[in-house]
Image (tube, rainbow, N blue to C red):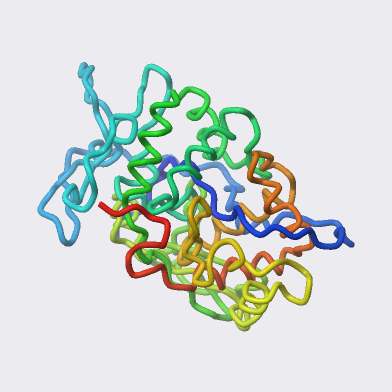
Amino acid sequence: MKSSKILMGLGLAGTCVAAALAAEPAQQALQKPEWAYAVPTSPPTPAPPRDQTLHSLPGTDRKFTWDQVQGRRPPGFTGQVGPADWFPNEHPPMPDIVAYGDPARGILPCALCHYPSGKGRSENASVAGLPKEYMVQTMRDMRDGLRVSAEPRKANAGLMVRFAKAMTDAEMEASAGYYASIPWTPHVKVVESRTGPKVRNLGGLLLPHEGAQAGVEPLGKRILEVTEDGERTELRDPHSPFIAYVPIGTLAKGKALVTTGGRGRTVACGACHGEDLNGIGPIPGIAGRSPSYIARQLNDLRQGTRRGPWAPLMTGVVQNLTDEDILNISAYVAAQPPAPTGGTNAPRR
């Protein structure tokens, strides 16, 4: 397996906008779960120089250089350039803002970080199959200063705010409609464990160490969401899934909170997200999505950094949650299967 490279990520759509009943005021100071944001704590390792070697992936006959994978414009070329699209037959035609972005306005292609498939990665967001109305409102909230990360060091969240401020309403509609049309399918496996692999943090993407540095360490009270195949993930393979290691007993605790509200601690998620957690109307499906992302959104809501018009639906739901509650809920929700058709609120192609 090749050594890892830093890939830029960005965040887009949200995960929880539901439930309606207010709970009792919080009785303790609430601290954000650091593991959910995976902010690098050391300077990034310089990326090694890249040649023009053609890379390939299983299941496709397409080949791309590293620069093409990243969507880098060749010297002297002024036309539109987008990141590699390994499986063009698996998604509809991409709008220009998704495929190419707009360098003149500093907007990166949506497909660079969320992929043409909308799968995304643990450091950003999985947007395939989310309701168009929800995604449009998300971008408007970012544009209007109503949605930022509770962790100011999370660079890709700040980038997404900048992109939203530069996008037109038509581009928001086009990008949201495109990703809403792609059904969501499983992309993360949740595993209860006492240990997890030793990892390195590359721009918020966690990759297991290789070679002499490989090994395991106690998991503690965190979710450790890592790529299953580092090389394929770095090449932006939408077929390369993630594994989320969670503490023993997490899923049972999460089920109690998600399905019953935990005796008044919160509200059962199915009240608004649907009994199978695959969404109802404009309320997004959350089943089977990244637990790291779910945890970030729950904490952002709890910390009050998501203040858009739909945020009050979640304010009472999250205000009494502890960090451990957020861990348990996120793991359980991520372990649930998406609907066979990609979600009850995902438009079909």
Q: Considering depth in this image, is 122 or 280 the residue closer to the camera?
A: 280
What residue appears at the point 65 percent right and 40 percent down from the top-left corner? 309
Q: Residue furthest right?
A: 27
Numbered disc total: 0
Relative to residue 53, is residue 221 depicted above or below? below
Quadrant containing the N terminus is bottom left
Relative to residue 253, is residue 24 depicted above or below? above
Q: Considering depth in this image, is 105 or 348 the residue closer to the camera?
A: 348
Image position, residue 73 (x, y; %): 26, 26
What residue appears at the point 48 percent right and 73 percent down from the top-left corner? 336
Q: Residue furthest left?
A: 61
Say left or right for 50 vs 219: left
Say left or right for 264 vs 313: right
Image position, residue 112 (x, y; %): 35, 40
What residue appears at the point 44 percent right and 64 percent down from the top-left corner? 208
Relative to residue 192, is residue 39 depicted above or below? above
Q: Considering depth in this image, is 46 or 293 the residue closer to the camera?
A: 293
Image position, residue 301 (x, y; %): 69, 50
- Residue 224 quadrant: bottom right
Image position, residue 28 (x, y; %): 88, 61
What residue appears at the point 30 percent right and 38 percent down from the top-left corner? 70
